[in-house]
Amino acid sequence: MSLFSMISRWTNLLFILILPLLAVAQQEESERSAAIRQSQFVNFEAIPVFTADTGNAVAHIHYRIRQNFFVFVKNEQEKGPDRFVANGELLVELLDEQKKSVAREVRQINLRRTNIPHADESVADLQGVVVFSVPNGRYTVLFRVDDRESGRSFLNRDRQLATRRPLLGSFEISFPFLGQIVFPEDNTKPVGIFPFNLGGGYPFGSGGGFVLQLATPGSTRPISLEWTLKRERPLERTGGGMGSFLTPNAEGDLIAAALEDQALSGNQFTLVDGYFNLHASDSGISYDAQNGSTGWKILFIPLPLEQLAPWPRYRLDLKIISDGGTKEQTYYFGSLWQKKPRSLLDPNFAIDALKHIASDQELEDIQSGSFAKSAKAFFQFWRTRDPDTTTVYNEVMEEYYRRVDRANERFSSVREQDGYKTDRGRIFILFGPPTRTNRVLGTDSTLIEVWIFENVGRRFTFLDRGRTGNFILAKVEEL
C-alpha cells in the first residue's frame, strides 16, 4: 500500500521500538531529582524497594542493553542455526561514601543469532535486574558493560542511590519507577507491573504512570493523593556530572513547540495489597503483588503520558495524604522519542519535505509567521492525518519521515542531502520500497531503472541519460 493511500485512509500503523536517545539519571532518593543524559546503547536505573525482610535495605538495578552494542562474529565453535555470536560482560557494583565496594555482581553475556543485526532492524533489547541487599546508606552505582570482540566499553559511576530499611509502624513510600500495570478483565489483582526500564524515562506516545510502594500502618481511613505535572525548561549543559543536562534539539522540536506548556493535575490511583514480587529474564522485567503480613501496598498513579510532547525533563509534584501524615515529593522524568527520524531534527528540512503531500496553501500556512505558529500549523497538518488522536505520537508522520531518511541515504548527491527531492526519492517516500527493482543498460547507453510495486499494481521507469546518477521518472504504468 502506498503511503499516500495510508495517509488518506489513516491506516497501516507502524510502531517499532528501539534504543532510546536519552536517559534520566537518578540522584539521591532524598532529593528526588534527576539529570538528563544521553545513552545510545545502555540504560539503567537504581530503584530502592521495600521487602518483607525489614532487616535489610534492598536495591533493584534495572538495565536495558541494545544488542547492537555488541559485535557479532561468525560462530566457529558450533554447528547449527546460530551462525553468529557475541560475548560480553556486565559488572554492577555499589560503592559506599568512602568509595569501598559493599556489593558486586558480574554476569557473562552470550548472544546467539542466525544473522548479523542491521541498523534498522527491530531487535529485542537485553534486559535484566541486579538485586542487592545492603545496609542503610548512600551509594554510588558503578555500572559497566564490555564487549569482548571489539573492546567497546560503557562505564557510568555518576548514579547515586540512597537505601533504607522500612521503619515499622510508620507511614512510608518507596522511590517510584515509570511503567504500566495490566489488570485482568475482572479488574482484580493485577497480572503484571511492567517497568519501562529506560533509565527513568518512558517511550513517547505510551500510556502508563508511576509505580511505588506504600505502607500506612494503623490507618483507619483511605489515603488520598494529588499530583501536578509540568514541563521544565532545560538547563544549559555544563560539561558533565549530575547537574548537567543534554537536550539535543529540544527547544527546536516542532511537536514540543506546538503544544502548550500547560500544568496538568489529577488525583486518581490504584492500590493493591502486597509488596513487589520480582520476575526477571533476558527479555524483560515485571512485578506482581505478593501478599504478606507487612501491611505494604503497591500504588499505581496513572499519568497522561500519551498526551505529553517529546521532552527531556518533566516535573511531577506528588502529595500523598493519610491519617498517618502527609508525604510530599518531587520527581523528574523524560519523554523519549526512541526512533525519531533524523529528518525531523531540522524543522526547516522537515517542513520542506512535506512538498510531496502538502498543498501550496498548507505549505504557506506552515512556513509563515513565528516558529511557534509554524509548529502549530505543522502539528495540525499531521493531526488531521493521524489514525489515533488519543496520543500525541503520530505513526503515519513517523513513517513518512522514516522514508525521507531512507530516500536521503539512497539517492542524495555527494555534497547535499537532497535525495528526498529526486524522482526516485519522491516515489520511495510515497510508496515505500518497491517489490522488485530491475536495472539495465539501454541501446543508447542510457541507464534504465524499473521499480515494480505489486501491492499497488504500478510500474515506474526512471532514466539516467547522462549516467550521472540523476534518474528522471519517465513512465508510470498500471500492472
Image (cartoon, helix red, strand yellow):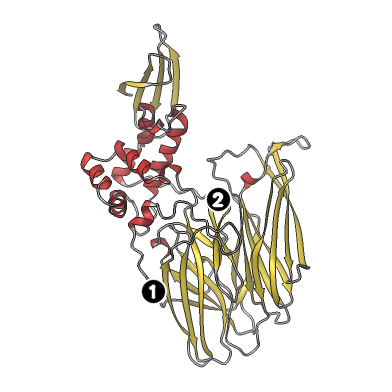
Report x, y in % for residue 161.
65, 70
Q: Earlier in the sequence, mark 2 or mark 1?
A: 2
Task: Name the residue tied to disc 2.
Answer: 19
Q: Quadrant of residue 341?
A: top left
Task: Name the residue tied to disc 1.
Answer: 265
Q: Is the residue under label 1 in contact with that under label 2 (CB below 8 Å)?
A: no
Instruction: Give the numbered dot on residue 407.
Output: none
Secondary element at image label 1: strand
Image quarter of the C terminus = top left
Q: Residue furthest left?
A: 361
Vertical position of residue 236 compared to residue 12: above or below: below
Vertical position of residue 315 compared to residue 434: above or below: below
Residue at (67, 41) in percent of width and height: 71
**Residue 422 visible to the viewer:** yes
Q: For mark 1, does the 10 Å Cα neighbourhood hold few (<14), some (14 to 19), or many (20 or more) residues?
A: some
Report x, y in % for residue 152.
69, 45
Task: Identify which residue, 467 or 81, lies in the foreground.
Answer: 467
Question: Mark 2 and mark 1: span between their CA atoms?
Answer: 30 Å
Could you tell whether 27 is left or right of 372 in the image?
A: right
Vertical position of residue 78 compared to residue 390: above or below: above
Could you tell whether 18 is left or right of 294 in the image?
A: left
Residue at (65, 38) in percent of width and height: 114
Q: Residue furthest top?
A: 443
Task: Identify which residue, 192 or 38, lies in the foreground.
Answer: 38
Secondary element at image label 2: loop
Q: For mark 2, does the 10 Å Cα neighbourhood hold few (<14), some (14 to 19), or many (20 or more) residues?
A: many
Report x, y in % for residue 307.
38, 62
